[in-house]
Image (cartoon, helix red, strand yellow):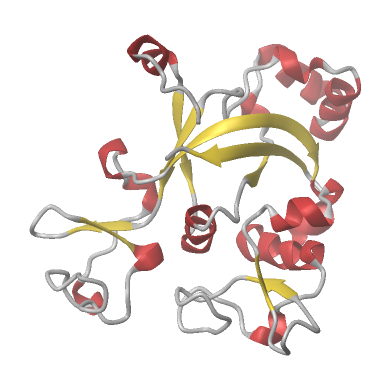
């Protein structure tokens, strides 16, 4: 059992907000998602790096810093190990000041003890970017941060990106993909049909990445922040 933090330790922890889509929130809550990749952007570095980018280009400047081990000198936009990320997700505040989350909103509002929640068509969902800290239900502790190329992802890391693993033939074949809110393949809300699930975790992650960042983004093999974390109880 871990030792509880003191008040001084808690106050010293740095927190940053981070956005997650509904499928990724589901992965976080199920402890399937323990890694996230985010595009490296030039503005995330100080002026000297910008000058180097202007001279040789972003890709070359990043490669130089990576090969020289100089990323440790730079402030990471997603924090350092020990820092925390609080999750912003699409939400709704009811008339009773209760927070409802789009990621797990039931098709039938009475199904999970949510009798006071209005039908989905009457809910005015607020974008995740507008979620205040007090409404967040998920906090993540940063375990590791590094920079790598997108195509460096392994099968194991692809699994840790929140993909779900299912079998429809009694365990003969296992496939990876994004489920609907009920946990199964489909197209009722955010899920993929079973035909889009893949036996390769890396191929499934490629599909997920392109659905978020566009077809060209995967082919470009950009530099990404790889942030490992664990969910704070």
Indicate the quadrant containing the C terminus: top left, top right, bottom left or bottom right: top left
Q: Residue at x 47, y 55 (%)?
A: 29
Q: Is residue 49 above or below residue 109?
A: above
Q: Residue extending furthest left?
A: 96
**Between 107 and 63, the one nearer to me in the picture:** 107
Q: Residue extending furthest top?
A: 8
Q: Is residue 46 visible?
A: yes
- Residue 56 as seen in the image, left or right of residue 201: right
Residue 8 in the image, given as x and y percentages of width and height: 37, 9
Task: Give the quarter of the image for residue 111.
Answer: bottom left
**Between 46 and 186, the one nearer to me in the picture:** 186
Q: Is residue 214 visible?
A: no
Q: Residue extending furthest bottom?
A: 169
Q: Residue at x 62, y 84 (%)?
A: 193
Q: Residue at x 55, y 84 (%)?
A: 186
Q: How many marks?
A: 0
**Between 46 and 127, the one nearer to me in the picture:** 127
Q: Residue at x 68, y 52 (%)?
A: 160
Q: Is residue 133 above or below residue 77?
A: below
Residue 215 in the image, given as x and y percentages of width and height: 73, 64
Task: Give the quarter of the image for residue 228.
Answer: top right
- Residue 191 as seen in the image, left or right of residue 160: left
Residue 132 in the image, given as x and y percentages of width and height: 29, 40
């Amino acid at each position: 059992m871990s030792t509880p933090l003191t008040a001084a330790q808690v106050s010293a922890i740095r927190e940053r907000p981070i956005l997650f889509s509904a499928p990724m929130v589901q992965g976080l809550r199920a402890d399937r998602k323990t890694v996230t990749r985010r595009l490296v952007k030039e503005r995330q570095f100080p002026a000297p790096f910008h000058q180097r980018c202007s001279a040789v280009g972003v890709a070359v400047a990043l490669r130089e810093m990576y090969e020289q081990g100089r990323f440790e000198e730079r402030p990471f936009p997603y924090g350092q190990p020990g820092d925390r990320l609080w999750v912003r997700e699409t939400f709704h505040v009811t008339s009773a000041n209760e927070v409802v989350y789009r990621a797990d909103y039931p098709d039938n509002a009475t199904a999970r003890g949510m009798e006071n929640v209005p039908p989905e068509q009457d809910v005015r969902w607020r974008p995740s970017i507008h979620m205040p800290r007090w409404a967040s239900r998920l906090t993540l502790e940063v375990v590791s941060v590094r920079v790598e190329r997108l195509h460096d992802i392994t099968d194991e890391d692809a699994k840790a990106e929140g993909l779900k693993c299912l079998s429809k033939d009694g365990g003969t074949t296992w496939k990876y993909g994004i489920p609907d809110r009920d946990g199964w393949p489909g197209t009722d809300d955010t899920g993929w049909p079973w035909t889009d699930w893949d036996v390769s975790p890396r191929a499934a992650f490629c599909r997920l990445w392109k659905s978020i960042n566009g077809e060209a983004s995967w082919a470009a093999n950009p530099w990404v922040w790889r942030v490992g974390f664990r969910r704070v109880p």
